[in-house]
């Protein structure tokens, strides 16, 4: 499936879950839908940020729409954190409403403005390959607890990072840097003749 089609499908699932939260008065049901929503949303944002957006940047450069999308992800994740903290409380409903509005705005821009540009720039074959990669990464991301990646992304956003790094990759890179000994001993200054 084309990457953009897959991402749109995930957008539809997220909006179905928002609707389900709104439609029930039962707190336990609300919680169960919210946990599904959070897991989907964190995984979706994660694969866009780590795989989809960088692929787009390679073809299009860091243009305005992509820059704005990255900033919006940080805002959405902060709002998700607020709703998560309000789970089971009276302020949960309106915090979820704020989150929903932010997500709807972001999704509309992606689907109406950004994806058409990306489809033109990447072409069918690349979009299909990217779609497979995104699908696999999404399943993997959703297996884990959503709080850890959420908190790590927020920590990086608050530290001012626009392009946040996945925590594992950061750790891996540090580990590699530690084990790598300097390739060459510092060159001694040659004596001048
Ligand atoms: Fe996005
Ligand atoms: Fe998206």
Image (cartoon, rainbow, N blue to C red):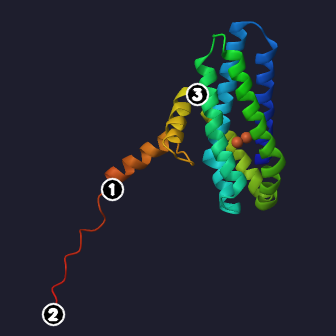
Q: From the viewer's perspective, is residue 89 above or below residue 52? A: above
SS for dot 2: loop
Query: Are the residues flagged by discs 1 and 2 in contact, CB closer than 8 Å?
Result: no
- Give the Cα separation between the discs numbered 1 and 3: 32 Å
Return the disc, 1 or 2, that comes first in the chain's sequence: 1
SS for dot 3: loop
**Quadrant of the drawing holding the N terminus:** top right
How many neighbours does mark 1 have within 10 angstroms: few (below 14), some (14-19), or many (20 or more)?
few
The quarter holding residue 8 reads top right
SS for dot 1: loop
Q: Is mark 2 within 8 Å of ligand 1?
A: no
How many neighbours does mark 2 have within 10 angstroms: few (below 14), some (14-19), or many (20 or more)?
few
The quarter holding residue 120 reads bottom right
Query: Are the residues flagged by discs 1 and 3 in contact, CB closer than 8 Å?
Result: no
Residue designated by label 1:
180
Q: Nearer the viewer, mark 1 or mark 2?
A: 2
Q: Is residue 160 left or right of residue 135?
A: left
Residue designated by label 2:
193
Return the disc, 2 or 3, that comes first in the chain's sequence: 3
Residue designated by label 3:
146
Q: Is residue 62 left or right of residue 175?
A: right
For residue 32, say whether it is visible.
no
Q: Nearer the viewer, residue 154 or 142?
A: 154
Q: Which residue is at 62% across, 33% downward?
A: 77
Q: Which residue is at 70% across, 40% downward?
A: 135
How many neighbours does mark 3 have within 10 angstroms: few (below 14), some (14-19), or many (20 or more)?
some
Q: Nearer the viewer, residue 78 or 172?
A: 78
Residue 173: x and y in percent read 43, 49
- Give the Cα separation between the discs numbered 1 and 2: 35 Å
Q: Which residue is at 32% across, 50% downward?
A: 178
Q: Which mark is residue 38?
A: none
* Ligand 1 location (quadrant): top right
């Amino acid at each position: 499936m084309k990457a953009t089609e897959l991402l749109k499908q995930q957008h539809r699932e997220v909006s179905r879950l928002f609707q389900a939260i709104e439609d029930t008065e039962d707190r336990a049901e609300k919680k169960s839908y919210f946990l599904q929503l959070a897991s989907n949303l964190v995984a979706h944002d994660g694969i866009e940020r780590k795989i989809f957006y960088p692929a787009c940047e390679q073809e299009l450069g860091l243009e305005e729409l992509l820059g704005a999308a990255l900033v919006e992800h940080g805002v959405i994740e902060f709002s998700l954190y607020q709703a998560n903290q309000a789970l089971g409380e009276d302020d949960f409903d309106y915090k979820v409403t704020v989150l929903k509005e932010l997500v709807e705005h972001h999704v509309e821009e992606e689907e109406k403005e950004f994806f058409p540009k990306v489809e033109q720039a990447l072409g069918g074959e690349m979009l299909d390959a990217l779609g497979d990669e995104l699908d696999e990464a999404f399943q993997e991301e959703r297996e884990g607890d959503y709080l850890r990646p959420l908190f790590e992304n927020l920590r990086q956003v608050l530290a001012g990072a626009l392009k946040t790094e996945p925590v594992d990759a950061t750790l891996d890179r540090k580990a590699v840097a530690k084990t790598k000994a300097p390739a060459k001993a510092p060159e001694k200054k040659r004596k001048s003749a």
